[in-house]
Amino acid sequence: MTARCKKRRNKNNAIRRAKNKVKEVKKLKKMLGFIEEDAGEGNLMDKLKDITEQKQKEQELELVKKEALEELIKEETKDIINHEKFVTVINPKTKVKHVYNVKTKRDQFGQYPVWYNAKKQRKKQLLREGKATKRKQFRGKRMHFIDRTCNWKALLGK
């Protein structure tokens, strides 16, 4: 793109922004409740007061929820723990105390650590339960020209 085209485009965009600015400001004020379609009902300060009161109620509700969640976590972590088979880790972001079992690698909530590979764990669990078997290495001569999914014994019989 040439500098002249860019300059012309920027100039046209500036004109367009100036033209639409009035409409956008009016739309924003209407959205925030500064301008009312039905004239006369309440003034601007009353509206702002209502908005701030709503915001405060929401913040108080969030605080109550957070405290309830912390209490639940404390109750769940209170369980009697044998410290020989468990490792305690505190999450730096959420400040939640996780007590991991050394043998199963799970915490008191039944979750694995972030670094642990879930697919690998699932595979090991299936092997332990006997629902899956380890893949054995193919022994013998492999026929490269025949796909292993096809019925190659029938093809050789013909």
Image (cartoon, rainbow, N blue to C red):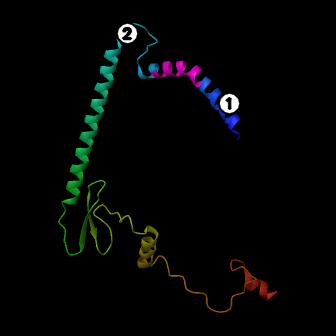
Of residues 29 and 20, the one drawn nearer to the viewer in this rendering:
20
Structural distance between the alpha carbons of marks 1 and 2: 47 Å
Q: How many marks?
A: 2
Q: Position of residue 158 (x, y in %)?
A: 82, 86
Q: Identify the mark at residue 128; answer none if there is no mark.
A: none
Q: Earlier in the sequence, mark 1 or mark 2?
A: 1
Check if residue 22 falls in the magenta segment: yes
| Residue at x 30% of width, y 25% of height | 52
> Which quarter of the figure has residue 141?
bottom right
Q: Which mark is residue 8?
A: 1
Q: Quadrant of residue 76?
A: bottom left
Residue that extends furthest to the right in the rendered view of this protein: 158
The percent coordinates of residue 118 (x first, y second) are 43, 67
Q: Is residue 107 above or below residue 1?
A: below
Per the image, is 131 magenta? no
Q: Residue furthest top?
A: 40
Name the quarter where the N terminus is drawn.
top right
Write down the region rendered in magenta. Answer: 16-28
Toward the bottom, the furthest residue is: 140
Q: Which residue is mark 2?
A: 41
Q: Is residue 16 above or below residue 94?
A: above
- The residue drawn where x is 23% and y is 45% is 68
Amino acid type at circle 1 is Arg
